[in-house]
Amino acid sequence: MVDLKANPFNLNDEQIKWVEDTYNSMSLDEKIGQLFVLLKAIPGVNEELIKGTLDQFHQGGLRWQGGDKETVYLQNTTYQKNSKVPLFVAANCDDGGIGAVPEGTFVATAAECGAGEGTENAYNLGYVSGKEASAIGCNWMFNPVVDVYKNWRNTIVNTRSFGSEADKVIDNARAYIKGVKAANPNMACTAKHFPGDGVEELDQHLVMGVNNLSVDEWEESFGKVYRTLIDEGLEAIMVGHIALPEMSRKLVPGIEDKDIKPATLSKELLTDLLREDMNFNGLVITDASHMVGMSATSKRCDAVPGAIIAGCDMFLFANDIAEDMAYVRKAYEDGLLTEERLEEAVRRILGMKAHLNLTDESVIIPDKKELDNIGCEAHRECAKKAADECITLVKDTYKNLPVNPDEKKRVFLVYVGSTPTTKGYTGDPVKKVVIEELENAGFEVDVCPSYYDLEVENGVSPMNFVKMLNHEPRQAFIDTHDFALVVINVKGYAQENEVRVRWSCNHSCELPWYNEEVPTIGMSLNYTNHLIDVPQLHTFINAYAPKREHIRAAIEKMTGKSEFKGTADETVFCGRWDTRL
């Protein structure tokens, strides 16, 4: 059974008694309910509805969807006040408190922290995330991401990984955890996505991931990361819908390819490797269960209980709550989910709740005054610090920098955003910020048209496409522009496996035909791998975030008012020689 006196629980006798008494008082349905972290997707707060849901399903944890800080605080505390057993309330703060509520602080991406010297920015990222998530009643951080970024084509973890080297990931993940614990000692941290993303380019929202490293390669990278953090008392691990076939073949000699499952459903990876070999005693939770990475490999009636049987203690989200819980109950009644495995999972859940002191009402219901910490000036200073210390000059082979606006004032701005996905598109607000910050720096900005914006401004017309094909005489362009700036703010999520630069139409005047006519600078406000699509740009900056602080800091560095301090990861060159020219 679970050793609740050992790491990471470290419970005393009184806490263990609470676990035992609580467990022994539970019905089978209450035990099954503890296995689920459910999503609150309905906006607003209806106490009767919340109470009814808790009485019916007895869920162990909560994630919410939408709402400002006041609403989310009320919602989370209402759940706690009406729950028989204190709830885990989870937050997903990859970039700061903005992951908890819209008023939260964007501090930095993991890639940004990895580009900076030392780990102070990762610590600040964890601290602000912990402080702001705690203010709305969270006690479980679904971070840090500890994926090792091995494949530049992978965009699902591009900005979410601290880097391509295991030691850098370890150092920054450790700092993030320390930051969270400094903000709130009663908040659990979670390393994800075991057994490790970043090796291939596929997104587990769309397909089962496959980490194809050999056993030795995995041990030297992902294995090193997880073993180190486990030895240091890691509390929780989120398991990705990612297979690790070479490890499965080692642990289960003769296993057929058709039987190789994502880690969420793999007993050899969760029980044999993670629990027994790696000696992880903490809480294991699946990644979101609606991902195709899980549903494409098993029927849901098998996958829901199958994850618990394989070694997960908790199941993230439900399709139909009653149906999913019934699947677990049937597996228990049929003997597939043993009494021992169910008891182990529930005791581990209760043990973590005791470890976090969730039995103390002052812990699970924070003082509402803590909401003032969200988005406060001190936290915004952390964002400014990260931008100053991490923004990276990837290359400047033609010595185009610095650009003095007193001498080279006229800039041709090409802004490339993500393809609009709604008829409600009225323009990209980040584009407006870029223009404002360039003008504030003293530049005269000539904005290249975008087909999407022309359709909004002029209405749907074939003439918009014609305008996008327009290229003025080269000499006239040279005479009226001192340099060109290509700003790329492209990002995608759970819609395609790779996200690349997509110009707003074919043969567009946005394309870098101007690259050899005037000095041209590229700047990414998101992904770090855009040189694959614009290798001909001889100057390139990774600014990491589409936030005003980052845009302003990047322009200050571009103009020589501030030095570039970030260091580029080798992956930015995408394994090609021409991206370095």
Image (tube, rainbow, N blue to C red):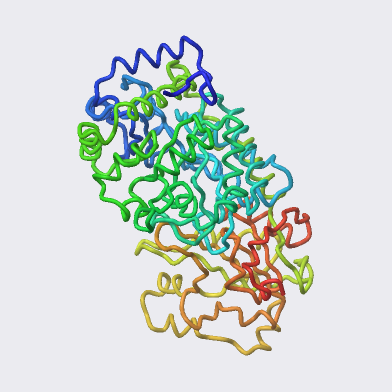
Farthest residue to the top: give it: 14
Please state the horizontal and vertical placement of residue 488, each as a whole percent of the image. 57, 65
Q: Nearer the viewer, residue 469 or 198?
A: 198
The residue at the point 53 percent across, 26 percent down is 8
Please state the horizontal and vertical placement of residue 51, each as a whole percent of the image. 26, 25
Judged left or right of residue 296, residue 180 is right
Judged left or right of residue 538, residue 358 is left
Please state the horizontal and vertical placement of residue 25, each as a whole percent of the image. 29, 15
Judged left or right of residue 22, residue 141 is right
Label tally: 0
Locate the C terminus and report the quarter of the image it occupies. bottom right
Q: Nearer the viewer, residue 134 or 226?
A: 226
Q: Nearer the viewer, residue 472 or 223?
A: 223
Quadrant of res 330: top left
Locate the N terminus and report the quarter of the image it occupies. top left
The residue at the point 35 percent across, 38 percent down is 315
Residue 493 visible in the shown view: yes
Please state the horizontal and vertical placement of residue 200, each as a whole percent of the image. 51, 60
Residue 78 visible in the shown view: no
Q: Nearer the viewer, residue 136 or 463?
A: 136
The residue at the point 64 percent across, 72 percent down is 576
Relative vertical location of residue 281 with respect to residue 410 in this rendering, above or below: above
